[in-house]
Amino acid sequence: MKTILVIGIGTGNPEHMTVQAINALNRADVLFIPTKGEAKAQLATIRRDIVSRYVTRPDGRLVEFAVPVRQTADRSYDQSVDQWHAAIATAYEQLLTAELGEGQTGAFLVWGDPMLYDSTIRIIERVRAMGSVDFDYSVIPGITSIQALAASHRIPLNLVGKPVEITTGRRLSESFPARSETAVVMLDGEQAFLQIDDPEARIYWGAYLGTPQEIVVSGRLAEVKEEIVKTRAEARARHGWIMDIYLLQKGADFEA
Ligand SMILES: C[S@@+](CC[C@H](N)C(=O)[O-])C[C@H]1O[C@@H](n2cnc3c(N)ncnc32)[C@H](O)[C@@H]1O
């Protein structure tokens, strides 16, 4: 039987790697590194840096693979994601068949933590259901971008005794401020915070968290939103890509 390790690697700072993650890297005969084209080349570089910094076994082998691109034309969002996952599952199946010998261990290095807006676990389950490769797998947790955001802003995530909603830019309007006093927003290419018109709202925004390019901005949403839009556009143009996340909050720890 083959073994797969799904390893959370944190969000850009090699020091996000836990001792458990480092030990897992060193159990792997083969380390799979996803590449996502020129624009996101830095993400593959960070994974390679992690491997060269922490892998001490001399025979660990790196295998790079191109992640299929999600097609969006003429299909719903759900169809688009489902077809994308199917294409990645086929790529994984080929990797596990071609690159991993019987009894060997392979590792996927997953950005942040594998449970948060990441489909590696779902796709591994899909490969298992396809039935052509016999393997078992374990998941090693990592530092998420939510933790990196809260740490950089030196804030607790939740107001005292209150819930937090984690959502995407596409769905923000459903949650904040009507449903939740605290919302973490990920995967927002449209800057959905611009649609929030609440004088009480505060924002804690961060881009490239954990990397040397990290930028953070915080304040009352109405006062800093234009600064965030400008900063984001400039940074994106400079680096060719951006990953950002933010927390919106209103209310207080203790109601008066
Ligand atoms: C596909 S999700 C992966 C999340 C990841 N599994 C995690 O644990 O954070 C990608 C989104 O995570 C957020 N993100 C990940 N890394 C980030 C970073 N270093 N700085 C800012 N946001 C980040 C952004 O919202 C980005 O659109």
Image (spheres, helix red, strand yellow):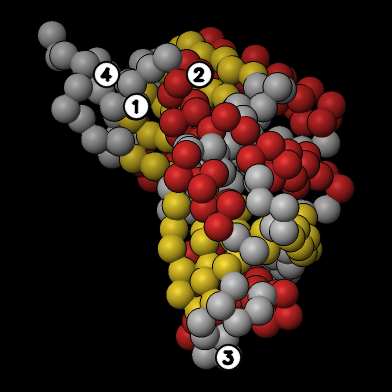
Query: What is the three-letter code of the residue carrying label 3?
Result: Ser
Q: Nearer the viewer, mark 1 or mark 4?
A: 1
> How far apart are the two marked residues, 3 and 4, measured between alpha carbons?
53 Å
Q: Nearer the N terminus, badge 1 or badge 4?
A: 1
Secondary element at tag 3: loop
Direction from residue 229 to residue 81 in the image, left or right: left
Q: Above or below — where is 138 with respect to 169?
A: below
Label whose residue precedes the other's in the sequence (3 or 4): 3
Residue lying at 52% horizontally and 53% vertically, measured from the top left: 24
Labelled disc at residue 157: 1
The disc at residue 251 is 4
Reading the image, the residue beneath label 2 is 152
Residue 132 - label: 3
- The label nearer to you, 4 versus 2, is 2
Give 81 or 250, whichever is nearer the viewer.
81
Is residue 105 at least partly visible in the picture?
yes
Which quadrant would residue 213 be assigned to in this image?
Answer: top right
When asked about the image quadrant of residue 35, the answer is: bottom right
**Residue kind at label 4, given as amino acid type:** Gly
Please state the total of marks drawn on the protein image: 4
Residue at image coords 76%, 25%: 235
Which amino acid, by three-letter code, is at mark 2?
Ser
Crowding near pointer 3: few (<14 within 10 Å), some, many (20+)?
few
Q: Position of residue 166 (x, y in %)?
A: 39, 42
